[in-house]
Amino acid sequence: MRLALFLLVLLFSTLPAQAAKTVLVMGDSLSAGYGIRPEQAWPALLDKRLAEKRLDYSVANLSISGETTAGGRARFAAALRQYQPAVVVIALGANDGLRGLQLVQMRDNLSAMTAAAQATGARVLLAGMRLPPNYGPYAEEFRSSFATVASGRKSALLPFLLETVASQPSLFQADNLHPTASAQPLILDHVWPALLPLLK
């Protein structure tokens, strides 16, 4: 009897644990945690929340400071192969806008990334950004580009990643561009309702 129990325990202890599904975050400095510790950035806080809620997901944050949509697109196929994500959060575009890059190309990059993720069966959340009004008509076209891509690809959309912190200067670092550590939980709370329906 003891031998049988031992063999049973041994069998189950050698079975591989089912790997958690992956939420892949492709972003720029706003998601990479520029100026703060990586574990303070909202994607790291998301990973903790998923564990706390016992949701079978882990976060792979491939965000890079300074990244453009072109850079993200260049890395994206390899990221999909490596992580085989169930959910992808694309939070790119801010650097395209700040540099005044061609918006038609930005939309094409975002659309191509969304389509590539969807082709693997992944669900996509596109996180939009906004520019200061002094960018003129370009700022409005930039803002609407994210909705255009999301509508065209039938993906989920978070219109403005920094919606809940943008109007609070105290939540930004000295450069007035990057949120502080104390802003990160607020960003996560804003992302969460848009992301939750995708965590099937």
Image (tube, rainbow, N blue to C red):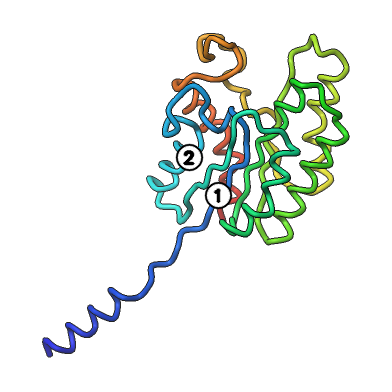
Q: Earlier in the sequence, mark 1 or mark 2?
A: 1
Q: Closest to the observer: 147 or 24?
A: 24
Asked if 141 appears above or below 154 in the picture, the reply is above
Where in the figure is residue 22, as x and y percent of width and height?
53, 54
What is the spatial separation of the Cα atoms under label 1 and label 2, in whole angstroms? 9 Å
Q: Residue at x 62, y 59 (%)?
A: 81
* Helix, strand or loop at mark 1: strand
Specify whether 100 is left or right of 179: right
Residue density around tag 1, few if under 14, some if 14–19, many if 20 or more, within 10 Å? many
* Helix, strand or loop at mark 2: helix
Evaluate if marks 1 and 2 touch, with contact meaning CB atoms under 8 Å apart. yes
Specify whether 2 is left or right of 107: left
On residue 46, which mark appears? Answer: 2
Asked if 84 appears above or below 72 in the picture, the reply is below
Q: Quadrant of the C terminus?
A: bottom right
Which residue has dot 1 on it?
23
Where in the figure is residue 28, as x and y percent of width and height?
62, 32
Q: Amino acid at mark 1?
A: Val
